[in-house]
Structures are given as C-alpha cells and as structure tokens.
Image (cartoon, coloured by chain):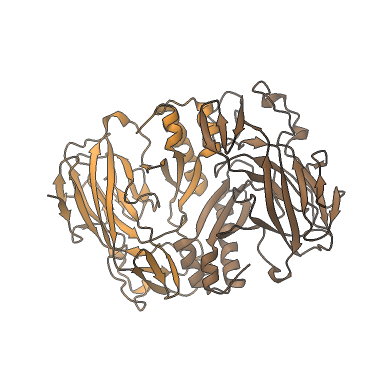
Chain colours: A brown, B orange
Amino acid sequence: MTTKVGRNQLFFAFSPELQPATRVQQGEEVVLETHDCFEGQIQTTRDLVDELDWEHVNPATGPVYIEGAKPGDILRVDLLEMKIGPQSSMVTIPGEGALGDVITQMETSILRLEGNQIVFKDKIRVPKKPMIGVIGVAPQGDAVPCGTPGPHGGNMDCTLITAGNSVYFTVGVEGALFGAGDFHAAMGDGEIVVCGAETSGEVRFRAQVVEHLQGLPTPFVETGTVVATIYSAQSIDEAADGAIHRMAQFLTDFAKIPLNDAGMLMSLVGELKFCQVVDPLKTVRFEFPKSVLAEYGFEM
Amino acid sequence: MTTKVGRNQLFFAFSPELQPATRVQQGEEVVLETHDCFEGQIQTTRDLVDELDWEHVNPATGPVYIEGAKPGDILRVDLLEMKIGPQSSMVTIPGEGALGDVITQMETSILRLEGNQIVFKDKIRVPKKPMIGVIGVAPQGDAVPCGTPGPHGGNMDCTLITAGNSVYFTVGVEGALFGAGDFHAAMGDGEIVVCGAETSGEVRFRAQVVEHLQGLPTPFVETGTVVATIYSAQSIDEAADGAIHRMAQFLTDFAKIPLNDAGMLMSLVGELKFCQVVDPLKTVRFEFPKSVLAEYGFEM
C-alpha cells in the first residue's frame, strides 16, 4: 500500500513548526499530489497575475514525517515517478525576472500537454521535461517560505530534480518534514521570466536515511550519470563559488580524490550550471560525472 | 589551394595595429596552426607554471586580413575542421581560479590523446571534446590582450566554439584581423582551475561578411541546433544579464518574435550557461533552439 498525500495538504513555508500531513517509514513509497505554483488560480489566458492571491503562491504538499530521521542525518529522497497535469501556464510580469526591465505587458499563456510534447500558443512544440521546482525539508531554525531556496532545499528550480534521480538533504528536525511542489512540465536553466511551464502533478518517492554519507554537502543531487552540489546566494557569483567549493569538498572528503586532481577534473569534465537567476536568491549547481568517481573507487 | 598560417605567426593582443599574417578572400578556406596557451613551454610534469615566461602565454595565430570586411560588418566564421595535438596539459596554480583559495600545490599534469579519449594520470579516460578558447577580431579601439574576453571575442572559453559551428563577430577594423588559439582537447563549463586540457592544434575555417545580419549582438555562435549570445563582464551576474538581454534583442529584432513570447520561450527552452568564471572578466552564454526560430520563419 502506498501512502498518498492529497493536494489539499499544503504548506507555504518549510518550518520546524509544521504539523505532519502523514507519517511514513523509511523506504516506504509515498505519493504527493501537487498544485502548480499558483495553487490552480491560473486556468485561462484571462487569469492575469495582478489578480492573484499571493498568499496562495508556491505551495508544497506535505509535510511528510519520515520515522527515525533525526537532525543532522542525511536523507536520500528517491524520485521514482512523476506525473504532470494536462495543461500548464506561463506568465510575464513587468518588473520581474531577468527581463523585467523590458517586459511591459502582463500576459498569461496556457500550454497543452500532447503526448511527450508541450504546445505553446498552438505553434511551438517542445519536449516535455518534467521537473520539481520546490522540494525540501524543514530547517532547524526560522521558517523559510516555499518560494525561497536554501540549505534545506526549497525553490531551487533545478532541472535535475526529476523522476529517476535522488536528492539528498540534511535533516533539520525530527522526522525531516519533507514536502514538494511547483512542478514544471519543462523549464530551461535560468528560468528567465520567473516561471517554467507551471503545472500540477504528482510524484512517487521514498526517503531513507543514509548513514555513510554523514556530512554530505546538501542539497545534493544524484542522477544516472552525475552528482551535483547546489548552492543559493544573493549573487550568482556567490552561488557559483558555493557550488564549486562544495563539490571540491565532496570530491576530496567523500570520494577521496586528491585536491589537485579534483580541481583539474572539475575543470576538465565538471560543469558549472545555472538553476535559476530570478529569485532574490540565485541558485547554481556543479555537476560531476559518476564515471570518474567510479575510477576512484567511490559509489554513492 | 588552402592558405595556411603557421604557428610561428603569433600575436598576444587583438589590436587595430596588428600587421596581417596573410590576406584572404571572403569564403576562402584558411588553416591556422595554433600553439597551446603556454606557447609550448609545458611539455612534461616537471614544467611548472612558476617557470613560465608569462610574456608568451595565450598566443593567437594570425591575424588574417579578410578582404572587403569593413568596420561594422558582421563576419561569420565557419569552423570547418579542428585538429588537436597528441598531448595536452593541465596545471594547478595556488591563488588562481575558482579554487585558488584552497589549492596550495603547484602541479602540472600531461594528458595523452588516445583515439577519441583523453587520458588523465593514466587512469581517467574522458571523451575528447576539442574547442577553441581564444578567437576574435581586432577591436576598433585599444588593444585587448588575448587572455581577455570582450565584445571583439577573445578568451571566451565557450565550449560551443568548435568544428561544425559558426561564430559571428562585428568587424572593428578594415580586414577584420581575425585570429584564434588556446585550443582545449576538452573543458567543462566554468573552467574551474583556469585551464582545460591545453593543447596545440589547427583549425580550418572560412570567413564571410553577412549583410542581412547587420546589428547582430556579437559575439554570437550558431551550432546545428542552437544559437547563442555571449557576454563577458566583471561579475557573473552582469555577464548573465548581458547574455540574456542580447538574446532577447536578437529574438525580437531579428527573429521578430514578440517580446513576451521571446521571454516565455527563453524561460521554457532557452538555457543560460557558463563559459568561464576564472578570468578577471567572467563569460556567460545564452542558448536558444533553432527549431523554435524556424517556427517563427527565421533562419540565420
């Protein structure tokens, strides 16, 4: 039996004060139904952002209490399956995003899902690439709004966070209080106008404490081919610096790669990538190939 | 007959004062032989960077005078073929690069080319991915050292700049005075320790003024699948802003995509990417799919 949390179980800030929507065992499969980032307020092209109730933006579903997860533990969340809704929306908001200085017209666009494609304005077909924008655990200290990224996860808008991949978090409070929302049917690295194709959906996952990775620089992502550190900061320069140094720390401390080798290999086959540059905090990741880790005898 | 410029024809700054190494017609094929960024000073692991003659770092081969290229023209350079040398080098330099604060040991590593792979420390095999680090035309004003990126091109370290792709420049002076050097057998986006696999090589290219793209935001790259704007600035934040706004300008002015559509599509399928974050000026590119341009009826 899979535990399911409906999209009526929402929260708007990752907080140690949250009441669990459900409690599950480690390794148990859970399905979260999610709202889009507008909590469904945008359904047609006539629904413009100036009519939004901003108290109902960026909800996450949950939180899920993971039995036995204690502060300081590293929690691996395996994203087993992701579904997205039949339509998604994009908006332009004058003054917001990386083009906010030139965009003057508010507009809402509704994109249809057709098979493996998303259709923009009945004209442009692009591949579906579902991803999770908001995902994280409750921090130990102050609550963090779901629209903000940070050490606990949150609104990282990282395109690697999708079905088949795993995300690692450092548990802040008993039970972790995990949640997710803000799915995108597709999004390019950068998220230029502050949205991907915003959609509802559901994700099936399981979460497990991994003892041997204590101290892992989180948030951390693992795909079939790469591992990635993620860091958010006021400027992209700081975010990049954080992601780079955390990867160097991981490669030396965990994979036991000598620092000079780690640096040269990061320069040779590592990839510094943008997640998003449009929230007050910017998010950058550093990807490194697992094949090279394997040559040094390391597996996650 | 193809014109060939040997690697004895070097220059160290893109300057309007340069004397042409050769003069060619538009569309004529030219081969440039290039030195690695150390002008061959590093051949073994015993050649450390503290013994380098820094007056002989980052040479470009050329310059090539393109007949008929006038200031303000847009010059398309088609990179037809690229060869790289049998070995390449990587170095660590304490105090330099994105990990300069933690790297304390100077080291030189020699990488062998074996078929389509590069071998690092006899252990790590990674795919060969040749690219050109330094490429550009003479600016109209002050000379720019070859190690510096800018509106004229230069040390952009953009992994898209490789055989099969085209790079567009705005001509600064009569004849353009085009040159290239600083090849990498492979390099990851970011160039963390200030080098890729530095190698000598040769590139076969042809250059052509393209009248219909007057005003193109250059440097600009075209591959089989994407177009990209490139921008360099003191901070990554500024470089990202520049690359993003130039792509928006290109999409609206050239591809005639309405600004809101351009912004939403940049958010949906555009990709903001790092070139390098380790020179005094940082370089960022914005990639946009040509398939979407085609839907709007635009071809380069």
Q: Count all numbered tags in the image, as a single digit.
A: 0
> Relative to A227, does residue B172 appear above or below in the rendering?
above
Residue at x 83% of width, y 58% of height:
A175
Horizontal and vertical percent position of residue B177 = 22, 46
Residue B241 seen in the current view: yes
The single residue placed furthest to the bottom in the displayed view is: B46
Horizontal and vertical percent position of residue B197 = 38, 64
Horizontal and vertical percent position of residue A92 = 60, 29
Toward which corner of the image does residue A121 lie, by quadrant?
top right
Residue at x 61% of width, y 69% of height:
A299
Residue B214 seen in the current view: no
Residue at x 29% of width, y 46% of height:
B142
In this picture, residue B63 sits left or right of residue A257: left
In this picture, residue B83 sits left or right of residue B109: left
- Of residues A178 and A218, the one nearer the viewer is A178
The single residue placed furthest to the top in the displayed view is: A46
Toward which corner of the image does residue A88 lie, by quadrant?
top right
Residue at x 44% of width, y 29% of height:
B295
